[in-house]
Amino acid sequence: SLVSVSKSGDQASSTSFTITLKGTDTSSVVNSTLAVGNITVKAGTTTVSPTTKTLGAATTVDNGKQYVLTLSGITTDGIISIVIAKDTLKDESNNASVATTLTTKVNIKSVSVSAESVKGGSITLSKTLAAVGDTITWTTTATTNFSYQGATVVCGSTTSTVDSSTKSYETVSTCKNPKIYPSWKRSDYYVWRSGKVNNTGGWGTVLYDGAKMTVHYLSPNYAISYSGAPGLDYRAQVSTKKTYDVTDFSQLTGYFWCPDPPKDSSLIGVGITKTPSSWGYSLASYKSASIKNTSARKTATVTLTSYKGSYYVFSHFLSKNTTGSNNFDCYHDQSTFTGDTYKYGHTGLS
């Protein structure tokens, strides 16, 4: 008979558990040949070979013998049962035992699923132990300013993607330890944007070099206008009054256009700096676009992956307006931080 089992319910394949067995009769059992080889282990209806299968020495109990069977490393899903072969116990009259099946309440779930840490939020799995073919679902909790973008399921060197609307994964026999990495995107942020988002911090340091052009801040602080007369060289730089933490942004993009463009080589650009009182056009964190003789909308983008912490954002304008007779007029009317996406391979965690 089955006396006790040390575990019950859903268990991982690696779980080690013991089964206490007892054989008795109305008179004393005088002979026992029970051994590991006499015991068959099944998960559901499938015969399995545990990595650990040991039988302790027999102890004498009233009218019988008692054993402790230890099992672990069962990689097949299902309720565990054991089949004890016939003729393993005999009483004083030499009557032999019949084959006996004993069923436990241990339910092996061979797939162990884990939710991995990624900056931007967390997911909660419906279960962490599953049978092959089970569906794992999850709920998402995003950190402020982040949004869920789907997930990557990692199985050894193999990956698969889950889109943002599905939030589920069906387990397979070829992946016993899937790791689920959620993806989180930081929302974009407009430092300034014409007519849409104000530069709430206002403008700070302004630098000039050469002829002093006219710099306007279009009310309420949502764009910069550069204008000047022909035949002169101009350089100007305008910085924000406050700093911005760039840690969770992948790039900064400036948007420009010139309804009356300069006639010669001219550049307009955007960048980040720690020292707004110094020119930033030679910094690696500055990028510009040519606006010579064109009214087409231009952009310049700074990659921010190597920058962390707080910076001022600055707009820089260089005009060599030596040709022609018209005044020039240009606008830097948008600067946008693009939110980074943290995911498998780029978790944002140190």
Image: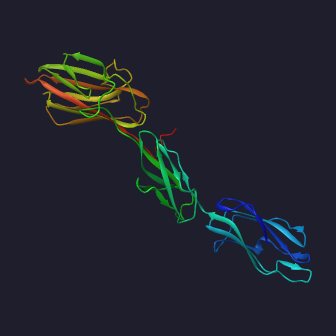
* Residue 301, image x, y percentages: 30, 35
Residue sticking out furthest to the left: 325
* Residue 309, image x, y percentages: 44, 29
Report whether residue 344 is seen.
Answer: no
- In the image, 107 versus 330, the foreground residue is 107
Note whether 253 is above or below 164 in the view shown: above
The quadrant in which residue 186 appears is top left
Q: Is residue 160 left or right of residue 327?
A: right
* Residue 244, image x, y percentages: 39, 28
Note whether 216 is above or below 178 in the view shown: above
The quadrant in which residue 216 appears is top left
Note whether 104 is above or below 258 in the view shown: below
Report whether residue 88 is seen.
Answer: yes
Q: Is residue 316 left or right of residue 90?
A: left
How many numbered marks are there? 0
The quadrant in which residue 202 appears is top left
Q: How is the image coloured?
A: rainbow
Q: Residue at x 52, y 66 (%)?
A: 133
* Residue 280, image x, y percentages: 32, 23
Q: Is residue 239 left or right of residue 18?
A: left
Q: Residue at x 14, y 25 (%)?
A: 328
Q: Residue at x 27, y 22 (%)?
A: 237
